[in-house]
Image: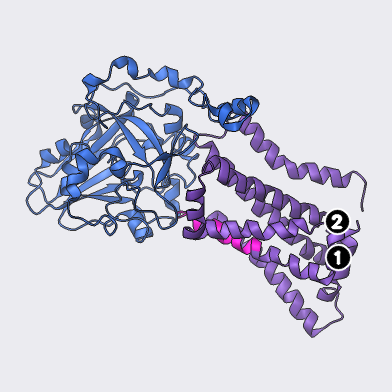
């Protein structure tokens, strides 16, 4: 069973956060792998994170049946290994560059083919019924994490604006502000970042708008104040710093699709059988682990989402 | 211009990038994905040493610093050394001896095919870097060692092809390599037109020999 209901997971199984700030011991077998105990010790240290303090306001949230019981990636890694091109193309940079990024005040305009379009204030959204969702995140680059997100289903926001029957897709837009986003001063990608989902994908209970991480407000480098998380798709579908959500009747063109249409499709479902043209997607390195693990179809969320794609050729609709 | 201690000094300087990487690894300062950092770093060092090796000839001629030749072999061998580390990182830390997946990579992924080729091309150069080989191969040695151009070109394209969107860094290498190769093309053309000038391609064999004798 890929998912455990929260009642199946004894709370003792979920390791308290502070333990992640101690040295990891997941490479107990490293010495054996390497042949020498000395080298094993070195490797163990090599993979151990530095200690870091958490900063952020506590959030009120409940647990979710959609959480995985897999070992969570340390907070320090989730916040210091970020693909956030609005800050930098270097994954180690956003942690520093996002430090003073101002996320308040902030509003999200939800508009388009809806009966009650509305602009939401971020403070109001943080008061929605929040849940912790411990999801796997699989990056298109071949690494993965397990992240305890805090958020609410996108559907609960969309239901408030009442999409009309013409709405077939949802188009998301990030903040465009080169003064605050130094990466936007260069045309590495076409700014602002745009992402899209099909209506049924957007309304799926797994699809989450995220405002927090590890029990606290979302760190800037992870997409504050609000981002999308679609756990069965590659990480880049999870657009960050959202300012606009538009209900539309056309299939939106994602930023990465614009950049390289043969490499990044609209769907971008995690699929070990469809390789990126330049590298294999069959395996992934879970951050903190030494050997790679096989990548699961739909990132292991097939039971929940495979039916959305019945009859579709996923090799063509990558 | 050849103090005795200069060569060992340069030798240890060439090991500094490795020492820095090792130090960071030992102090858990390589971040969330250490294996990727090691792969990228060793790859970068390989490219840098290839560029340095290729820069020796133009610099010594243009600046008249002919003594620099004594370091060319060392730099070339360091390029090979870091290339070996890069390759080992890939097969051991990255793929963990998954031969099936690696063989697939080499023929299916153009960027890996090129990187692999660039590395393989360096092997005969390292093997024939000894003085005895130079004497034994004579003029053929120079021809053989032109493989370094292809190794460098493939290495740079390998880098360009693996990048997702930000081509800034690989294009810096591409620019430097272009300058180094264009210099050679020009020097050749000049030699062909005016055979008496110092940038004489034909004297290279002799220079190499004297260099090897250093």
Outermost residue on the top side: it is A12
- Nearest to viewer (mark 1 / mark 2): 1
Q: Is A256 situated above or below B26?
A: below
The answer to whether residue B208 is seen in the rendering is no
Residue furthest to the front in view is B100
Q: Is residue A266 magenta?
A: no
Q: Is residue A67 left or right of residue A291?
A: left
Indicate the chain on which mark 1 is placed.
B
Residue that appears at 44% across and 44% down: A87
Quarter where residue B139 is shown: bottom right
Q: Is disc 1 in contact with disc 2, using a CB cutoff of under 8 Å?
A: no
Q: Position of residue B205 (x, y in %)?
A: 85, 70
Q: Looking at this view, is B133 or B62 the one in front?
A: B133
For mark 1, give the secondary structure. helix
Neighbor class of circle 2 (other Cα within 10 Å; few <14, some 14-19, many 20+) is: some
Specify whether A129 is left or right of B213: left
Q: Which residue is mark 2?
A: B70
Quarter holding the C terminus of chain B is bottom right
- Residue drawn at x 28%, y 16% is A10
Q: Nearer the viewer, residue B140 or A56?
A: B140
- Residue marked by disc 1: B136
What is the spatial separation of the Cα atoms under label 1 and label 2, in whole angstroms?
A: 20 Å
Asked if residue A203 lies left or right of residue A218, the reply is left
Q: Residues within 10 Å of mark 1 (few under 14, many from 20)?
A: few
Which structural element holds mark 2?
A: helix
Please give the name of the residue rendered at 53% of the width and 41% of the height, measured from the top-left corner: B96
**Mark 2 belongs to which subunit?**
B
Image: magenta residue range: B151-166
Which chain is displayed in blue in the rendered image?
A
Name the tint of chain B in the rendering.
Answer: purple
User: Could you say where residue B36 lies in the image, as x and y percent from the top left?
Assistant: 53, 42
In percent of width and height, residue A72 lies at 38, 27
């Amino acid at each position: 069973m890929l998912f455990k209901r929260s009642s199946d997971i004894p709370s003792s199984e979920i390791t308290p956060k502070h333990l992640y700030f101690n040295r990891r011991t997941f490479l107990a077998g490293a010495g054996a792998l390497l042949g020498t105990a000395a080298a094993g010790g070195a490797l163990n240290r090599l993979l151990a994170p530095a200690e870091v303090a958490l900063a952020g306001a506590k959030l009120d949230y409940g647990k979710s049946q959609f959480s995985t019981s897999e070992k969570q990636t340390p907070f320090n890694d989730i916040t210091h290994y970020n693909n956030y091109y609005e800050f930098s193309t270097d994954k180690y940079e956003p942690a520093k560059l996002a430090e003073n990024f101002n996320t308040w005040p902030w509003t999200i305009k939800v508009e388009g083919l809806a009966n009650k379009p509305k602009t939401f204030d971020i403070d109001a959204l943080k008061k929605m019924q929040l849940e912790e969702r411990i999801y796997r995140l699989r990056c298109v680059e071949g690494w993965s994490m397990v992240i305890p997100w805090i958020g609410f289903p996108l559907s609960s926001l969309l239901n408030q604006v009442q999409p009309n029957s013409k709405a077939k897709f949802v188009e998301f837009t990030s903040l465009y502000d080169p003064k605050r986003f130094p990466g936007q001063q260069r045309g590495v990608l076409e700014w602002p970042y745009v992402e899209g989902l099909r209506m049924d994908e957007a309304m799926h209970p797994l699809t989450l708008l995220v405002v927090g991480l590890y029990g606290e407000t979302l760190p800037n480098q992870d997409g504050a104040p609000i981002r999308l998380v679609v756990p069965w798709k590659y990480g880049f579908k999870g657009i960050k710093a959202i300012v606009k959500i538009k209900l539309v009747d056309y299939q939106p063109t994602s930023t990465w699709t614009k950049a390289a249409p043969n490499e990044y499709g609209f769907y971008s479902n995690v699929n070990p059988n469809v390789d990126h043209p330049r590298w294999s997607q069959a395996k992934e390195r879970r951050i903190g682990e030494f050997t790679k693990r096989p990548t699961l179809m739909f990132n292991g969320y097939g039971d929940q989402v495979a039916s959305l794609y019945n009859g579709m050729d996923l090799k063509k609709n990558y | 211009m050849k103090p005795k201690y200069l060569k060992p000094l340069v030798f240890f300087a060439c090991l500094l990038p490795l020492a820095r990487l090792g130090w960071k690894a030992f102090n858990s300062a390589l971040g969330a994905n250490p294996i990727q950092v090691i792969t990228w770093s060793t790859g970068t060092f390989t490219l840098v040493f290839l560029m340095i090796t290729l820069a020796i000839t133009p610099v010594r001629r243009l600046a008249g610093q002919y003594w620099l030749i004594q370091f060319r072999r060392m730099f070339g061998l360091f390029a090979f050394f870091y290339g070996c580390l890069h390759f080992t990182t890939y097969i051991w830390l990255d793929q963990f001896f998954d031969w099936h997946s690696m063989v697939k990579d080499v023929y299916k992924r153009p960027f890996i095919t090129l990187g692999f080729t660039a590395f393989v091309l360096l092997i005969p150069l390292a093997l024939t870097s000894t003085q005895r080989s130079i004497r034994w191969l004579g003029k053929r040695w120079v021809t053989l060692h032109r493989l370094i151009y292809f190794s460098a070109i493939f290495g740079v394209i390998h880098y360009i092809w693996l990048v997702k969107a930000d081509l800034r860094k690989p294009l810096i290498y591409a620019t430097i390599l272009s300058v180094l190769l264009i210099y050679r093309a020009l020097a050749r053309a000049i030699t062909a037109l005016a055979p008496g000038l110092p940038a004489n391609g034909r004297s290279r064999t002799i220079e190499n020999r004297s260099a090897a004798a250093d």
